[in-house]
Image (cartoon, rainbow, N blue to C red):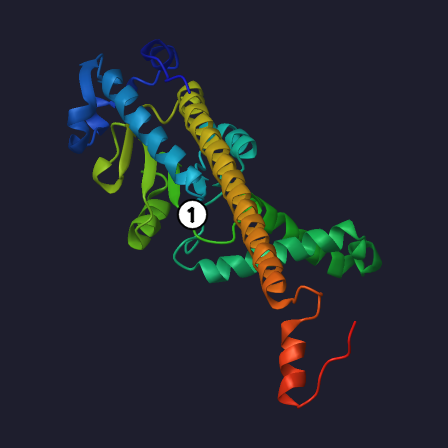
Amino acid sequence: MPATTLRQLLEAGVHFGHQTSRWNPQMRPYIFTARNGVHIIDLVQTQKHLDEATAFLRQLVADGDKVLFVGTKKQAQDAIRDGCERSGQHYVTHRWMGGMLTNFPVIQRRLRRLLELRSMQEKGDFERMSTKEANVHRDDLDRLEANFSGMVDMKRLPGALFVIDCKKERLAVSEANKLGIPIVAIVDTNCDPNEIQHVIPGNDDAIRSCKLIVNTVTDAIVEGERLLGERELREQEEIANRERQEREVAEQAAAQTAAETDNEDGTPKVAVEEFATAGAQPEAP
């Protein structure tokens, strides 16, 4: 997978930070300079950390885990939805609701309710209800779709979070840290990088910047999915080969046992021994 170049990062405006008056001093190591009252992010570090973050996510997905994308600001929503649809990951782009991670059993009930309402709508059940009852169900469906449609297939907690604007998504960051779920995030100059395990220093406000980094992350995840598929195929082939070998060994053992227990005339030795014990002779063939 080709690495994102410095030129691509520069053209997407990834280097533009916030006004110097709004900076977080913890971001000092990632800042190159200040120009016209705006901090300029060191793109060499951005490229390095982006490569490290994508390598981490690629291996995570190759090992069978999923990534939850989180970005509720308008600049991030479309890029996240497109990336997750391409890579088969989960996402939250409408609103982070408290307990989405720390109270996941309750969230799972809401996800089941969403699937139930979808099924009712597809079967035309709403049309057979009173107008008032149908409207209640439709409102519930619309609300659940807005909040949970990107998580509807999520059966367990994610292996990692990918976050755009960790300051805005501080509740998601807090819940992930409580549960020990690693976080990959675009971290702008107004954010605290100490809360993030895999920092990608960059502009989290510009659409082009968000889109470039999301696409790079998505490419790595797609590669991880490919590696996972290849590994699962190899494991299935190994299981099939092992089962075939076990059948062949069992068949050979059965044939060997049968050969050892027959007399030259084809009479089973076991039968001869049983007749002898009973004081009788077997009938001649």
Q: The C terminus is located in which quarter? A: bottom right
Reply above or below: 244 against 1.
below
Q: Residue at x 27, y 32 (%)?
A: 199
Q: Position of residue 95 (x, y in %)?
A: 47, 44
Reply above or below: 170 against 123.
above
Task: Give the side of residue 171 with respect to residue 232, left or right.
Answer: left
Please say whether residue 89 is visible from this viewpoint: no
Q: Residue at x 67, y 57 (%)?
A: 116
View extreme (bottom): residue: 279
Reply above or below: 13 against 92.
above
Task: Give the side of residue 25 with respect to residue 221, left or right.
Answer: left
Q: Position of residue 202 (x, y in %)?
A: 31, 24
Q: Residue at x 40, y 24 (%)?
A: 213
Reply above or below: 284 against 57.
below
Q: Quadrant of residue 270?
A: bottom right
Q: Position of residue 64 (x, y in %)?
A: 45, 44
The residue tagged 1 is: 158
Most foreground residue, 126 or 263: 263
What SS does tag 1 mark? loop
Please say whether residue 138 is visible from this viewpoint: yes
Most foreground residue, 144 or 254: 254
Most foreground residue, 34 or 117: 117
